[in-house]
C-alpha cells in the first residue's frame, strides 16, 4: 500500500492522513466546493475536487471517488466514518476497481450493518439482546402485536439507521400508530429505507460499546469498552474509556460475545459492538458499527494502540500484532465532542466564520480537529468541530484535566457547546459515574443546575469597557470638544439623509 | 461611550454597559489603548487594574495580583472559560431601546435562527395558525429544525420556498 485516498472530510480525514504520513504512505484528499480551504486538503499530498457542497453530489459520489483513485493511482480507499463507510455497494465497487477498501468485506457489512440482519446474527451467536422484532415491521398492525407481546414502553428504530434518526420511544399503545408513521418516514428521508423494527425500552440503560479489531487470518481481539451514555437526542456528547462501572469480569463477557459475533460473520478490520447495560449489569446487543468510530481516540489512549495504523496494516493482509492477552488497559480517557451549535437556543446549528481560535494543550491533552482561525464552517455537513480528549491515571484526574483544557479553549465567531461540558463535568452525578442515556436530558431540564461563575462582575465590566474603548480608538481618534460637535453635526446630517 | 470630566478632575472615557443584564458605568483613564496600570471607576467605586492587550481582542487583566485572560468574541467576553454577554450603550444615540414597546399585536415575523436550507414550508398565505405551530422546516448541518409561529393568527406572507438558502435572521414567514 503506497497511496491511500481518504473518502471523507473534517477531523477524521485529517486523522487518517496523519496515520498514513507516519507510515510513509502517500495521501489523496477529495473535497467539495465549500471544502477547498478545509484543513484535510491542506495536509494531504494530493487533492482533487469532487463536486458541489451537498454530500449527495460530493462525498457520497462513490463513482467519482473511484475515478479519482484511478487517476491518482491510489491503491486503497479509507472511508472514515459516515458518508460511504458502511455502504456495501461502495466496498464492492472498490474491490471491482482493484482498490483496497480499508474496512470490512461487503459480505460482513451486509450481515452486521443492517440492524435487523445483525439481530439475527446476534441470536445465532448466542448474544443476549433486547426483546423485540427481529425483522422489519410490515405495518402498524404488526407493530401493535409485537409491542403487546413484549409490553410497553417500547422503542421504534430504523433498520438502516444510526445517529438517532428514525427512533421513537412509545409508552402507550394509543401512541404507537402515529410514532410508527413518523419513525418510518424519517427513516425513509434519512436512509432511503423506511424499514422500522421495535424492541422493549430498557429503563435508564447505559450505552457501552466494545472496540474490535480483526485480521484476515481469523485473529480478532477486543480492545476494551467505551462508555457513551452522555447523549442528547441519541447523539453522543461525551465518551470515555474505560467505563466507570465495567469490571474485569463484565468486560471479558462483553468482549468475548462481541468477538463471537464478528467471527461468525467473517468480519475483518475495525468494528464496534454496541450494548445497552442495565443497573443489574445485564448487557443487551444493540447494533454493530462496521467502521471506525468517532470516539476511537479514547480507546487509543488507554490501550496505547493506533487504531488507524492497525486498520491499514490489516487491510494490507498483515496479521494482528497482538493477542487478547497482550491487550492492557491503562489510565482513563474522556472525549468531548465540540459541536457548532447553540446550547442557549435549542442547540440550533451555528455554522459560519471562526474569528478566534485558542486551543488547549499541555499534559494529557489530545485534540482531533479540522478547524482553524478564519475557517468558514459549512452548513452542509455534521456540526462537529473537534474532539477534545483528556487522558490521566484515573477518571477523576481525567475529568479535572478536561475542565482545565476547556477553560483554556476559546472558539469565537460561532456558537459552540464548550460551556455545556463544564456544567456536565462539574455535576456530582457525572463525577460519580451515575449516568445513563437519559442523564444529559435530565441535567438540561434542571435549570437550577447551572455552574456558578468564578469571575467577579467588576472584572467582567472592566474587561468589556476596555474592549469597547479600544475598539472605538481604533476607528475614531479621540477628538476635542469642538471637533466632537462637528462629528455630531455630521452624524445628524447622515441621519437626515436616511 | 462619551467623554466627560470625571470626579478627580482629569479627562476620562466613560463607557456605559449592560453586562449580563445589569447596567454598569465604567470610567477609564484616557490612555487605555496603551494599556498598563490604570485607575478605573465602576459605578462610583474606584479599582486599580493592569490591562495589557496581547493582540487584538485578547487582554490580560491583573486585578490585585489575580490574572484574567479576557478574549473578545463579538458581543461577549470570555474569561476563564466563562462567557459573558455585554452591550455598549451610547447615550448620544437617539434610537430607543431595542424591543421596547414591541408587543404581540401586529404582524410578527418568523426568522431563521441560523443559516440553512428550507426543506419544507408547512403553511400558505391566508392560513390560520396557532401559537407554537410549526411553519417552516430548516435544515443545517444534517439537523432538521422546525420553526414555530410566535403567535396565533393568519399567515400574511410566505417569503421563502423549498430549497432556498437562508441566512441567520432572514424573515421566512409573517404572521399577523
Image: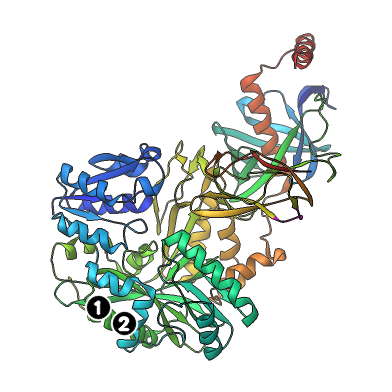
Question: Quadrant of the rendered structure where residue A31 is?
Answer: top left
Is residue B107 highlighted in magenta?
no
| Residue B167 seen in this snapshot | yes
Which chain letter goes with mark 1?
Answer: A
Picture layout, residue A65 above or below residue A481: below
Q: Residue at x 36, y 56 (%)?
A: A83
Q: Residue A447 occupies which quadrant of the picture?
A: bottom right
Instruction: Using the rendered image, report if marks 2 and 1 lie on a common chain.
Output: yes
- Front-most of residues A277 and A183: A183
Badge 1 density bin: few <14, some 14–19, many ≥20, Cα 10 Å: some
Q: Quadrant of the N terminus of chain B?
A: top right
Looking at the image, residue A125 lies above or below residue B95: below
Q: Is residue A97 left or right of residue B145?
A: left
Q: Which residues are magenta?
A: B129-133
Q: Chain of mark 2?
A: A
- Residue at 39% of width from left, 48% of height from top? A55
Say what secondary structure mark 1 lies in.
loop
Q: Check residue A200 in the rendering and tell me which mark sits there, or answer none.
A: none
Residue with the mark numbered 2:
A121
Q: In the rendered structure, which disc, 2 or 1, sits on the residue that comes first in sequence?
A: 2
Q: Residue at x 31, y 65 (%)?
A: A291
Q: Are marks 2 and 1 in contact (CB under 8 Å)?
A: yes
In the image shown, does B122 or B142 lie closer to the viewer? Answer: B122
Identify the mark at residue A265; answer none if there is no mark: 1
Residue A328: tell me if it is visible: no
Where residue A75 sits in the image (x, y, percent)?
A: 15, 52
The x, y position of residue A250, in whole percent, is 39, 86
For mark 2, give the secondary structure: helix
Secondary structure, magenta segment, majority class: loop
How many marks are shown on the rendered structure? 2
Please report the residue visible at 38 percent of the width from the left and 49 percent of the height from the top.
Answer: A56
Residue B129 pos. (x, y %)? 75, 53
Amino acid at each position: 500500500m503506497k497511496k491511500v485516498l481518504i473518502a471523507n472530510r473534517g477531523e477524521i480525514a485529517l486523522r487518517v492522513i496523519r496515520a498514513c504520513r507516519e507510515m510513509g504512505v502517500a495521501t489523496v484528499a477529495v473535497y467539495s466546493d465549500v471544502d477547498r480551504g478545509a484543513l484535510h486538503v491542506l495536509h494531504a499530498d494530493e487533492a482533487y475536487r469532487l463536486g458541489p457542497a451537498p454530500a449527495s453530489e460530493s462525498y457520497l459520489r462513490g463513482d467519482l471517488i473511484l475515478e479519482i483513485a484511478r487517476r491518482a493511482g491510489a491503491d486503497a480507499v479509507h472511508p472514515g466514518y459516515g458518508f460511504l463507510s458502511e455502504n456495501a455497494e461502495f466496498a464492492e465497487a472498490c474491490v471491482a476497481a482493484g482498490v483496497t477498501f480499508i474496512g470490512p468485506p461487503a459480505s460482513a457489512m451486509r450481515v452486521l450493518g443492517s440492524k435487523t440482519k445483525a439481530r439475527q446474527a446476534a441470536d445465532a451467536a448466542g448474544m443476549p439482546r433486547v426483546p423485540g422484532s427481529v425483522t422489519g415491521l410490515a405495518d402498524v398492525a404488526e407493530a401493535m402485536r409485537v409491542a403487546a407481546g413484549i409490553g410497553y414502553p417500547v422503542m421504534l428504530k430504523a433498520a438502516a439507521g444510526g445517529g438517532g434518526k428514525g427512533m421513537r420511544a412509545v409508552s402507550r399503545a394509543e401512541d404507537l400508530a402515529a410514532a410508527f408513521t413518523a419513525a418510518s418516514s424519517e427513516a425513509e428521508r434519512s436512509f432511503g429505507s423506511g424499514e422500522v423494527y421495535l424492541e422493549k425500552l430498557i429503563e435508564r440503560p447505559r450505552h457501552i460499546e466494545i472496540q474490535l479489531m480483526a485480521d484476515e487470518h481469523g485473529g480478532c481481539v477486543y480492545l476494551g469498552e467505551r462508555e457513551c451514555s452522555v447523549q442528547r437526542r441519541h447523539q453522543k456528547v461525551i465518551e470515555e474509556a474505560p467505563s466507570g462501572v465495567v469490571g474485569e469480569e463484565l468486560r471479558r463477557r462483553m468482549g468475548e460475545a462481541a468477538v463471537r459475533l464478528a467471527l461468525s460473520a467473517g468480519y475483518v478490520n475495525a468494528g464496534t459492538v454496541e450494548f445497552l447495560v442495565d443497573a443489574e449489569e445485564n448487557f443487551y446487543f444493540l447494533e454493530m458499527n462496521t467502521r471506525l468510530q468517532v470516539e476511537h481516540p479514547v480507546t487509543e489512549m488507554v490501550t496505547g494502540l493506533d487504531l488507524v495504523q492497525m486498520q491499514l496494516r490489516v487491510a494490507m493482509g498483515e496479521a494482528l500484532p497482538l493477542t487478547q492477552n497482550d491487550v492492557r488497559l491503562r489510565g482513563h480517557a474522556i472525549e468531548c465532542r465540540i459541536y457548532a451549535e447553540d446550547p442557549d437556543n435549542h442547540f440550533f446549528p451555528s455554522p459560519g466564520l471562526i474569528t478566534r481560535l485558542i486551543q488547549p494543550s499541555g499534559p494529557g491533552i489530545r485534540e482531533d480537529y479540522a478547524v482553524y482561525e478564519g475557517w468558514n464552517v459549512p452548513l452542509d455537513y455534521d456540526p462537529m468541530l473537534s474532539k477534545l480528549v483528556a487522558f490521566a491515571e484515573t477518571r477523576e484526574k481525567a475529568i479535572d484535566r478536561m475542565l482545565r483544557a476547556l477553560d483554556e479553549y476559546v472558539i469565537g465567531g460561532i456558537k459552540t457547546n464548550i460551556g455545556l461540558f463544564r456544567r456536565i463535568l462539574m455535576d456530582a452525578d457525572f463525577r460519580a459515574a451515575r449516568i445513563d442515556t437519559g442523564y444529559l436530558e435530565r441535567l438540561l431540564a434542571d435549570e437550577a443546575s447551572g455552574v456558578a461563575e468564578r469571575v467577579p462582575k467588576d472584572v467582567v465590566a472592566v474587561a468589556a469597557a476596555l474592549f469597547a474603548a479600544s475598539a472605538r480608538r481604533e476607528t475614531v481618534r479621540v477628538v476635542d470638544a469642538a471637533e466632537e460637535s462637528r462629528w455630531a453635526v455630521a452624524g445628524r446630517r447622515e441621519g437626515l439623509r436616511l | 461611550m462619551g467623554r466627560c470630566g470625571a470626579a478627580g478632575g482629569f479627562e476620562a472615557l466613560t463607557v456605559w454597559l449592560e453586562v449580563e443584564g445589569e447596567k454598569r458605568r465604567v470610567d477609564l483613564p484616557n490612555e487605555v489603548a496603551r494599556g498598563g496600570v490604570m485607575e478605573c471607576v465602576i459605578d462610583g467605586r474606584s479599582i486599580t487594574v493592569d490591562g495589557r492587550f496581547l493582540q487584538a481582542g485578547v487582554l490580560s487583566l491583573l486585578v490585585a495580583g489575580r490574572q484574567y485572560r479576557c478574549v473578545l468574541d463579538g458581543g461577549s467576553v470570555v474569561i476563564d472559560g466563562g462567557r459573558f454577554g455585554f452591550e455598549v450603550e451610547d447615550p448620544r444615540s437617539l434610537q430607543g431601546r431595542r424591543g421596547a414597546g414591541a408587543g404581540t399585536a401586529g404582524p410578527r415575523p418568523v426568522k431563521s435562527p441560523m443559516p440553512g436550507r428550507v426543506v419544507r414550508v408547512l403553511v400558505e398565505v391566508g392560513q390560520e395558525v396557532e401559537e407554537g405551530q410549526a411553519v417552516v422546516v430548516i435544515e443545517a448541518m444534517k439537523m432538521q429544525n422546525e420553526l414555530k409561529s410566535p403567535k396565533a393568527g393568519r399567515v400574511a406572507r410566505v417569503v421563502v420556498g423549498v430549497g432556498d438558502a437562508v441566512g441567520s435572521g432572514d424573515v421566512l414567514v409573517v404572521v399577523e
